[in-house]
Image (cartoon, rainbow, N blue to C red):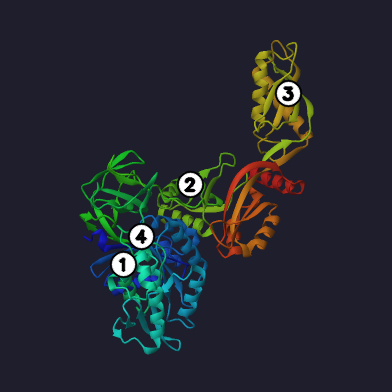
Amino acid sequence: MYTAKDIRNICLLGHGGDGKSALAESMLFLTKGTDRLGKRADGNTVSDFDPEEIKRGYSISTAVLPVEYRKCKINVLDNPGYFDFAGEIAQSLRVVDSGLICLTAKGGIAVGTEKSWDYLESAGMPAMFYISKMDEDHADFFKVLEALQNDYGTGVVPFNFPIMSGEKVLGIVDVMHEKAFKADGSAMDVPADCADQLEEYRHAISEAVAETDEELLEKFLMEEPFTPEELMNGVRTAINTRSLFPVFCGCAMNGLGTLNLLDNLIEFAPNPLEGKPMATEDGEVKLDPNGAPAVFVFKTIIDQYGKNSYFKVISGDATSDLALANFRAGTTEKLGRLFLPKGKKTTETAQIACGDIGVVSKLTSVRTGDTLGTAGKTAPLAPTAYANPCYRMAVYAKVKGQEDKVANGLSKLNEEDCSFNYSTNAETKELVIAGVGDIHLDVICSKLKSKYNVEAELRPAKIAYRETIKKKVEVHGRHKKQSGGHGQFGDVYIRFERQEESEEMIFADETVGGCVPKNFIPSVEKGLRNCVKKGVLAGYPVVFLKAVLYFGSYHAVDSSDMAFQTAASIAYKDGLPGAAPTLLEPISELKVYIPESNMGDIVGDLNKRRGRVMGMNPDPKHRGWSIVEAEVPTGEMSSYAIDLRAMTQGRGSFELNFIRYEEVPQANQPKIIADAKKDEEA
């Protein structure tokens, strides 16, 4: 069993296709964690084991890959690069202590690089870079390094760099240890033409170290060399305090730089006891190997054998005989059999140390984000925060009668993926699912079929329009029916008018002299309230309506509750068409977070969506970014998540919240009415 000081928990981040999974495979293969180098093209990587990942050729879910090397255990969490699966990254960041951002030597800084930096910066977590695919044509390590330094500052410093012969990479130079290595890991002499670069990078590292301590700063200014111990400790501190951001390079396919990267991670990446404290619901808590046993569940996977809960031990040690309280559910769970994960494979173990990552199965009450511990001794951690899912679609069963199977399948998938939500819209009667983007929802539908044998299709979600009137009308409603014996008689005069006090219909009684008996007045109101659920234009609920009963008549024998309800409905159906009925649409408040360079495209697009821009302000959290505030019709925003991604190359994000209803422009109403009638006929 590894102890906390011998564990490193590191997440791999970066743009899709920038070499994260390939690097993880290289780490496993070169440390004898696997007997062959997995390749995504062959569908045999350890990290991409889900059938959907193999079919699509990219990562969908975070994989935990333990790399054992030099008596240390590096838990590598390989994260998806596509933005639709950012929820997986949010979960990973709860349990790692540093992040390694992958980018290619040819492609350089991509949108995924920028987002990965933002994730780590927001989490206050150490960041490192790995420049991959050094063997590709036109690969240029130094050009990419310059771009990183321009974007993220002089604290970005190489800890190794390539030895080049033309465009061919012969090996790498380890800056900290002043050694050179070939692709096969064997030692070589540091070439004479690399000496100046080596000295430059060591000086940059020393400068970053000097800023961590006043005594070291004085020593640096006096040009006195640091002792090896001062340098090593100073580098760890500088990385952990985010004043130094190491850059590594290599090629996963031939192993160039992989072992050197692992050497540096072991020496300089923080262990769980040195990492950032974990957030509780009202503060922070550090890991405590000597405390009462406690674990934090950061991920859930459900397969044909049941539920698997991935956890990090945050206090004490986890053992199979432990019974721990689930603070959210108010239950007690016995852990039972414990496992150490490696992709889809697990190895049973009797004990998991503080700071390590494990798996436990069949804990029925446990969900992602739960803390299991001892009452009075464990501070429950804050649940993982996910970005608000803004891409909404209605989900329908392809086969009628399987609607319950779709809902049950979504419920189980939601335990695995908390970054989407779903609910039935009470007005439109649709099951609406909200996710990060179109790929996200497509994967969910594919999993419904593969895991739960139910086919679903996505359609644009219906918009909950409203109807109201703009004119005042007075109308007579009479219901008279004679069919032998007691007949039916109800007679009412009602004034309909617009009001602004309440969406709910306001009913008033202005009758005098008992023309309508008091016991039938509630019947009139009831009849009208049943009617306003369906408007006369397109069948949408009628709002901001006032109905005043001002006259009527009755029959001593034939009048009844039902007769007056029917008379009121006749008045409603006859009167509202003449009261200038109109459609109302939901209006939402929009906040778009974008680079300033995209401002013109965004504003132009909002104008096409009938949006009103209310303000444009600098984003205080991102230099060179702006926040555009606008009010837009909700019905115009169904594809905005996809369109914004296209306009900003995936950089932009937005928040959308309903605020009120407004009248639909007359030119837009006929289509809405026609579509509503088609739906009703269908």
Mark 4 closeness class: few <14, some 14–19, many ≥20 residues within 10 Å: many
Residues at circles 3 and 1 in contact by the CB criterion of under 8 Å = no
Q: Is residue 207 left or right of residue 325?
A: right
Instruction: Name the amino acid, label 3.
Output: Val
Q: What label sits on residue 402 in the rendered view?
A: 2
Q: Choose the circle earlier in sequence order: 3 or 2.
A: 2
Residues at circles 1 and 4 in contact by the CB criterion of under 8 Å = no
Please, is residue 489 above or below residue 182 in the view? above
Residue tagged 1: 233
Q: Choose the circle earlier in sequence order: 3 or 1.
A: 1
Q: Which residue is drawn at the image coordinates 67% and 62% (left, top)?
A: 600
Residue tagged 3: 548
Q: Which residue is drawn at the image coordinates 40% and 44% (left, top)?
A: 282
Residue tagged 4: 97
Please, is residue 50 above or below residue 206 in the view? above
Name the mark nearer the viewer: 2 or 1.
1
